[in-house]
């Protein structure tokens, strides 16, 4: 099964950063609309992101979501680790009975390779702290920096 927590959380954080940059308001409903995601999924992802200080949210009628620290202090690794928690990149098979040299050693061998790959992935993610600037710089979509997502969201209701 594919796990969409990290790419969705990344898009959430980028959207909040963009909204802040432009002085716009972010809410879970606006994020869910903009990401075409289930609002409960967005709220579920907000829990670890808030716990880890990546975002902060205020409640109430005028509540909104903001970055919990400056964007340049948030790495893609922070977002990934926050929303995936202890889930491994690749899960190894459970220990199986040793019936030959392969079955006796396959689990530890795969785990060591998977751990090495995960560590390398986390190191790459840790180097990226300016994701919004990178996205804006590489934008070839033809879209404005931010559509009036709030108006579109209200119209959809």
Image (cartoon, rainbow, N blue to C red):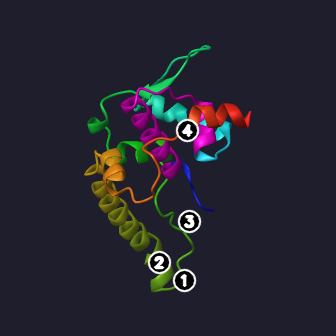
Q: Which of marks 2 and 4 is in front?
A: 4
Task: Give me the disc on residue 45.
Answer: 4
First-in-chain label (1 vs 4): 4
Question: How many residues crowd mark 1 within 10 Å: few (<14), some (14–19), many (20+)?
Answer: few
- Measuring from the top left, give residue 141's x and y in whole percent: 45, 58
Q: Are marks 2 and 4 in contact (CB under 8 Å)?
A: no
For the record, the magenta segment spans 6-34
- Residue of label 3: 94
Q: How far apart are labels 3 and 4 at the CA level?
A: 28 Å
- Quarter of the image holding residue 14? top left
Which residue position is annotated with label 2? 104
Q: Looking at the magenta stretch, what is its main secondary structure?
A: helix
How many neighbours does mark 3 have within 10 angstroms: few (below 14), some (14-19), or many (20 or more)?
few
Foreground: 16 or 48? 16
Q: In the rendered structure, which disc, 2 or 4, sits on the residue that comes first in sequence? A: 4
Name the residue nearer the viewer: 51 or 8. 8
Q: Position of residue 57 (x, y in %)?
A: 50, 22
The residue carrying mark 1 is 99
* Residue 45, position as x, y percentages in the image: 55, 38
Kindly report which numbered mark, 3 or 2, lies closer to the viewer in this rendering.
3
């Amino acid at each position: 099964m594919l796990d969409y927590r990290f790419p969705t959380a990344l898009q959430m954080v980028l959207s909040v950063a963009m909204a802040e940059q432009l002085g716009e308001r972010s809410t879970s409903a606006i994020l869910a609309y903009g990401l075409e995601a289930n609002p409960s999924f967005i709220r579920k992802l907000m829990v670890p992101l808030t716990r880890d200080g990546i975002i902060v949210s205020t409640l109430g009628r005028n509540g909104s979501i903001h970055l919990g620290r400056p964007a340049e202090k948030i790495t893609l690794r922070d977002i990934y680790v926050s929303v995936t928690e202890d889930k491994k990149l690749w899960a190894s098979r459970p220990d199986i009975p040793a019936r030959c040299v392969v079955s006796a050693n396959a689990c530890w061998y795969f785990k060591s390779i998977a751990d090495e790959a995960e560590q390398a992935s986390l190191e790459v993610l840790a180097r990226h702290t300016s994701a919004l600037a990178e996205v804006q710089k590489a934008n070839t979509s033809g879209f404005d920096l931010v559509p009036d997502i709030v108006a579109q969201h209200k119209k959809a209701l």
